[in-house]
Amino acid sequence: MAEEKSLENVDQNANLVGRKSDLIGVKRQIKIDGRNILFVHKKGKFFALDSKCYHSGGPLHKGDIEDVPNFSSCIVCPWHRYKICLQTGESVYQEAYPHQPVKRGPWKSTGVKQRTHCVIEREGNIYVQLSDLTQEMPSDHYNKERPPREEGVP
Ligand code: FES
C-alpha cells in the first residue's frame, strides 16, 4: 500500500522529459523548476543530476563520459577534470603514489557531492523528479535558483 502511495507522489511531481525512443544516447541540459539538470542516457540507463559541478560550477553537460572501475560511468567536468559518478553523484579519484609516479592505485570516492534526481519510465515516456532538497548537498550552491540581484548591489 505504501508503495502505491509513493508512486502517486512520483506522478504528481515528475516532469516529462520526452519519449524514451527519442532520448536514446542523449546528453543534454534540461530545466526543472528553475534548476539546471544534466540528463544522460548511457549504457541503457537514464541519469539525472545537477548540471553545474559542485566544485566551482563547471558545465557538466559539456563534459565527456568515461567508464571508471567500480563506479560505472562518470561525467568529467570540463573545467578541472573532476569525475562524478552518474549513478550516485560521488566524486571519484584514482589514488596516486608520489614516490611511484607510474603506479596508480584503486579508484575511490570522496563522497556524494553532486545531487542526483529520480528518473522514471512510464508507458514509453521518461520523467524526472527532483530529489528531496531539504538536505543540503555541495552541488546545491551552484544549482539553486537564486533571487535576482537588486540594482546597484554588486
Ligand atoms: Fe568542475 Fe572544477 S568546476 S572540476
Image: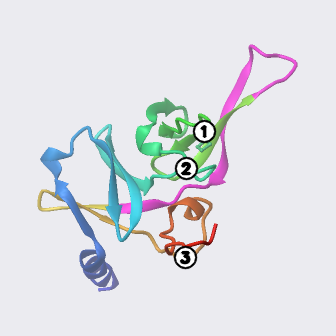
Q: Are marks 3 and 2 in contact (CB under 8 Å)?
A: no
- Of marks 3 and 1, the one in the foreground: 3
Figure quadrant of the C terminus: bottom right
Query: Does the magenta run of residues contain 108?
Result: yes
Can you give x and y, in whole percent of width and height, for residue 96 in the image? Answer: 76, 27
Q: Are marks 2 and 1 in contact (CB under 8 Å)?
A: yes
Can you give x and y, in whole percent of width and height, for residue 127 in the image? Answer: 25, 63
| Residue at image point 81% right, 24% down | 97
Secondary structure at badge 1 equals loop
- Identify the magenta region: 96-118
Residue 150: give its label.
3
How many neighbours does mark 2 have within 10 angstroms: few (below 14), some (14-19), or many (20 or more)?
A: many
Label 3, label 1: how far apart the Cα atoms are = 34 Å
Looking at the image, is 53 positioned above or below residue 120?
above
Query: Does the magenta run of residues contain 111?
Result: yes
Can you give x and y, in whole percent of width and height, for residue 55 in the image? Answer: 63, 49
Secondary structure at badge 2 equals loop
Give left or right: position of 116 versus 42: right
Residue 82: give its label.
1
